[in-house]
Image (cartoon, coloured by chain):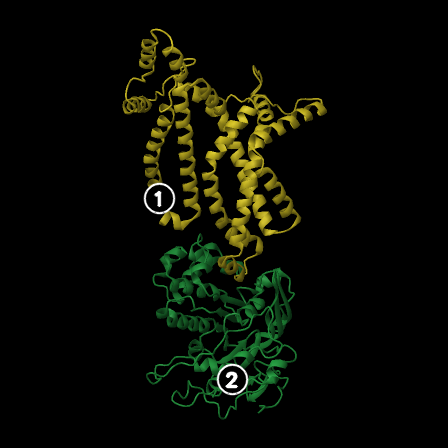
């Protein structure tokens, strides 16, 4: 079966085609990122388009190497110089690709800011935490030293660091991993950004504090009323945090939509597979999780057809020969997928919703 | 910081004590009258003469007792006297140390400052013309033995003087003998003398330091916290100086402390090439003369200076890195 109708040009959250959406905060169109390496060209991102709107939480999910981090680093202008970026990334209608570094510096840390994966290495070990937050404030705002310091203490207090006024002078090595990630979040919201990007913010942390950090992130986001792009490979995190989900596989979009739509009726076999692989507390004893067999393709030489085809139970000749079709509407308002043989949304039921039911992929 | 400095200072004490033991034993375990002994014992009545000689040098006493006596005298500021000219070792060291200090301090300061600058620029502009040229010269000078580079520079200096028709570079001694000049004249004369030997040491030190700084800087530029600083919108220049350089200096500080001993070795050679009357010449003469007290005193003085420099680098490291001073 082939689902749905072609994507309308406007205004389609996560829309695949057309001009950048100027009502979005960040609008990405046909983004491609290649890295020149000694072994050849690595095609990290192969034409993705998405938008993030005021105040929403957009999750970008996918395995390692699916291009999710690279996409947002491209938006921040933080890719290494050997990256070749094409397509369009615009912030409130202003094109970011090709923007002079000086102008981009003014946006980074103020309009858009970022929390990174590993808080143990993301803070400068020889600068006090307060100085590092205050520096971010003073780069963008005309504040005196002591004012920036007070602001740093306020921010630390906001992200739940006890005794913040004293802790401003502490160095990163005096903080635990969770505290460091709180400090990173404080730094990221220091200049009231309108979009906050969190790149696997809980992956490097102890499981017991992952939930706390997600709560802090949400509290921080609400305090500055920004949008949040949450990059993760953990669909459990997505479920509790995000409004909208964007699933990437091998540098392309697999499926996107509102959380409920995608979780209840995944149509892309990859998404369905991911959902089937999530452990649940209410799963009957003895029932095994269903892994997705195999591993993602090398992005040095991605297969000519669908990149997921070697791992897919529904693959046909079509999939080996032709790349997946453009994103196609599954159901309004925003559920789209790119697959030659999508599951029927009416029949596909996520194992998340129906742990005792049939496997969605079967 | 005070606790850290105190701890480092206290650790230096046993090291210092150990240095006295090594300085003493390195020399004391060698027989200073080996040649005379062979000659005298072949003569009639030679055995008594050997015994008298041994007694006069204190060689008849056990090693541990000799060490005790030497250490006791040392504690009172007496390092013995030269067996060659009878002058006190402290006096000889007092004359030689300032001469060598000029060379060592000039070479260290200049090579560190330029080495850091060259390394940082090379790292920031990786594979640029500047980087490639500085890499070429770094390996060129690093591969040169000190004595050879010194001799080449000396030769070039003489040729330059001939061509210029006026003596710009002095190639012998640390200053002109019987110089009668005012304060500035004295300094100008010393500068003319120090340029070539200092350059010898600088080129070799600079080569190593700049390579070290370059790789440290490259590591740090790739680090997550540099990316964090950029993500905050910190301007590039400030990212490099405030975030990257400060961290990349740490390994170079350690390296400078560790290679200080090598630098002293290089200085000994350079002083001999350029006929300086400094520590290098003093050591060489004491070895050639079998001058026990001077050799021991020299080793101890150099040992103390190495300990002092490492203490200094530890303190600088502590100032730069909070993890170390809190740890």
Q: Residue furthest top?
A: B44
Query: Could you classify mark 1 by the number of other residues whose Cα lies within 10 Å: few (under 14), some (14-19), or many (20 or more)?
Result: some
Colour assigned to chain A in the rendering is green
Q: For the residues marked 2 and 1, what is the alpha-carbon distance in whole angstroms?
A: 64 Å
Residue that extends furthest to the bottom in the rendered view of this protein = A346
Secondary structure of the residue carrying tag 2 is loop
State the residue position of label 1.
B4
Chain of the residue under the numbered disc 1 shown in the image:
B
Looking at this view, is A114 or B80 the one in front? B80
**In this figure, which residue is indicated by the disc labeled 2?**
A313
Residue B42 in the image: above or below residue B140: above
Is the same chain shared between marks 2 and 1? no
Q: How many marks?
A: 2
Q: Position of residue A217 (x, y in %)?
A: 43, 71
Shown in yellow, the chain is B
Residue B264: tell me if it is visible: yes
Q: Is residue B104 left or right of residue A11?
A: left
The crowding category of the residue bearing disc 2, from other C-alpha atoms within 10 Å (few below 14, some 14 to 19, many at least 20), is some
Vertical order, A116 against B296 (above or below) = below
Image coordinates for residue A347, horizontal then vertical, percent: 48, 92
Label 1: element kind: helix
């Amino acid at each position: 079966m082939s689902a749905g109708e072609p994507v309308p040009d406007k205004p389609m959250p996560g829309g695949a085609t057309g001009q950048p959406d100027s009502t979005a905060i960040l609008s990405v169109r046909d983004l491609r990122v290649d890295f020149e390496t000694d072994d050849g060209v690595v095609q990290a991102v192969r034409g993705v388009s998405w938008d993030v709107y005021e105040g929403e939480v957009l999750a970008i999910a996918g395995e390692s190497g699916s291009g999710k981090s690279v996409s947002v680093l491209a938006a921040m202008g933080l890719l290494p110089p050997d990256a070749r970026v094409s397509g369009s990334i615009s912030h409130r209608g202003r094109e970011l690709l090709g923007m002079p570094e000086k102008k981009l510096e003014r946006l980074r840390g103020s309009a858009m800011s970022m929390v990174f994966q590993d808080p143990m290495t993301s803070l400068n070990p020889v600068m006090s935490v307060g100085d590092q937050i205050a520096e971010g404030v003073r780069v963008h705002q005309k504040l005196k030293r002591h004012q920036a310091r007070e602001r740093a203490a306020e921010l630390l207090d906001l992200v739940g660091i006890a005794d913040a006024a004293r802790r401003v002078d502490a160095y990163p090595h005096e903080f635990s991993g969770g505290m460091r990630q709180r400090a990173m979040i404080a730094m990221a919201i220091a200049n009231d950004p309108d979009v906050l990007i969190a790149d696997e913010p809980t992956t490097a942390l102890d499981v017991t504090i992952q939930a706390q950090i997600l709560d802090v992130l949400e509290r921080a986001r609400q305090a500055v009323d920004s949008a949040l792009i949450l990059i993760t490979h953990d669909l459990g995190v997505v479920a509790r945090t995000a409004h909208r989900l964007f699933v990437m596989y091998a540098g392309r979009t697999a499926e996107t939509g509102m959380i409920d739509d995608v979780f209840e009726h995944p149509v892309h076999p990859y998404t369905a597979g991911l959902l089937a692989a999530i452990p649940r507390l209410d799963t009957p004893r003895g029932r095994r999780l269903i892994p997705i067999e195999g591993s993602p393709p090398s992005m040095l030489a991605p297969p000519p057809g669908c990149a997921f085809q070697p791992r897919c139970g529904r693959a046909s000749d079509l999939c080996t020969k032709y790349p997946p079709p453009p994103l196609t509407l599954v159901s309004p308002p925003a559920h789209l997928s790119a697959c030659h043989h999508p599951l029927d949304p009416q029949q596909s039921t996520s194992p998340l919703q129906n742990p005792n039911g049939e496997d969605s992929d079967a | 910081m005070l606790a850290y400095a105190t701890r480092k200072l206290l650790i230096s004490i046993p090291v210092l004590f150990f240095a006295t033991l090594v300085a003493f034993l390195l020399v004391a375990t060698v027989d200073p009258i080996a040649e005379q002994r062979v000659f005298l014992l072949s003569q009639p009545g030679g055995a008594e003469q050997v015994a008298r000689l041994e007694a006069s040098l204190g060689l008849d006493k056990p090693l541990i007792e000799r060490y005790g006596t030497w250490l006791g005298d040392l504690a009172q500021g007496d390092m013995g006297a030269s067996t060659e000219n009878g002058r006190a070792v402290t006096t000889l060291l007092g004359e030689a140390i300032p001469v060598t200090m000029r060379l060592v301090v000039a070479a260290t300061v200049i090579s560190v400052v330029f080495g850091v600058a060259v390394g940082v620029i090379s790292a920031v502009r990786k594979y640029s013309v500047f980087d490639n040229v500085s890499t070429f010269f770094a390996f060129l000078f690093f591969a040169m033995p000190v004595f050879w580079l010194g001799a080449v520079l000396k030769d070039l200096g003489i040729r330059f003087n001939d061509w210029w028709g006026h003596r710009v570079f002095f190639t012998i001694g640390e200053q002109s003998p019987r110089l009668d000049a005012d304060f500035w004249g004295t300094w100008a004369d010393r500068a003319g003398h120090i340029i070539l030997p200092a350059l010898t040491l600088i080129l070799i030190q600079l080569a190593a330091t700049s390579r070290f700084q370059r790789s440290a800087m490259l590591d740090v530029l790739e680090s997550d916290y540099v990316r964090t600083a950029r993500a905050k919108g910190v301007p590039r220049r400030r990212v490099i100086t405030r975030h990257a350089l400060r961290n990349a200096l740490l390994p170079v500080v350690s390296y400078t402390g560790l290679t200080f001993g090598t630098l002293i070795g290089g200085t000994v050679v350079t002083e001999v090439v350029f006929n300086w009357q400094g520590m290098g010449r003093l050591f060489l003469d004491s070895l050639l003369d079998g001058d026990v007290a001077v050799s021991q005193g020299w080793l101890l003085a150099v040992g103390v200076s190495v300990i002092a420099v490492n203490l200094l680098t530890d303190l600088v490291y502590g100032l730069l890195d909070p993890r170390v001073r809190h740890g």
